[in-house]
Amino acid sequence: YSWPKIRASIHLAMENPEVLQRIVALGVVSALGQFCIYSAIRILGSLSFTWIMTARQLLSVLISLIFFGHGFSFVKLLCILTVFAIMSWKQLSKIPERIKRRRRSSKPGCSTGDSTGTKSE
């Protein structure tokens, strides 16, 4: 990048309020998106978030194929479905483990305290 181009871009944004508004709006939306990503990972976990993003990308690709009239081949469909199936399998394989953990933690006498195994009071 060269400084004259950067200065020209800043000058353009300062002279045109519409451009500056779009830049600010893009920054705000980007920050909100990062907050949503952080919240989803914190609440759902990283694997669930990965599955959600994969599903979103799958939907985006399918819409793009239909809307823009891109060719639809068997190989494209197979690749898309393979990635989605692998991510789904990883997510669904964690369910029995989560159920076992919940059952163990809900049994009477189970430790709910620190890592030493003593019950906290």
Image: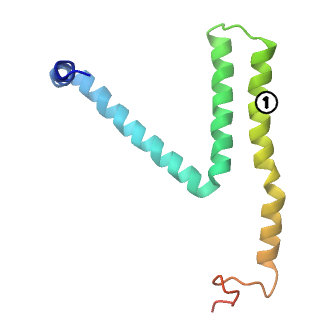
Quarter of the rendering containing residue 116: bottom right
Quarter of the rendering containing residue 8: top left
Q: Identify the element where label 1 is drawn.
A: helix
Look at 64% across and 54% down and name the residue there. 44
Above-or-below relation of 1 to 66:
below
61 left or right, relative to 103 = left
Which class describes the residues within 10 Å of circle 1: few (<14), some (14-19), or many (20+)? few
The colour mode here is rainbow
Above-or-below relation of 84 to 31:
above
Q: In which quarter of the image is the C terminus?
A: bottom right
Look at 65% across and 84% down and name the residue there. 113
Q: Where is residue 70 in the image (x, y as percent from the top left)?
A: 66, 8
Look at 64% across and 33% down and name the residue there. 56
Look at 84% across and 59% down and name the residue there. 96
Work out which residue is located at the far front of the displayed protein and give it.
Answer: 2
Work out which residue is located at the far bottom of the displayed protein and give it.
Answer: 121
Total count of labels: 1
Q: Where is residue 47 in the image (x, y as percent from the top left)?
A: 67, 49
Q: Position of residue 92 (x, y in %)?
A: 80, 49
Q: Quadrant of the N terminus?
A: top left
What kind of residue is marked 1? Thr
Above-or-below relation of 42 to 11:
below
16 left or right, relative to 62 = left
Q: Name the residue under label 1.
A: 82
115 left or right, relative to 79 = left
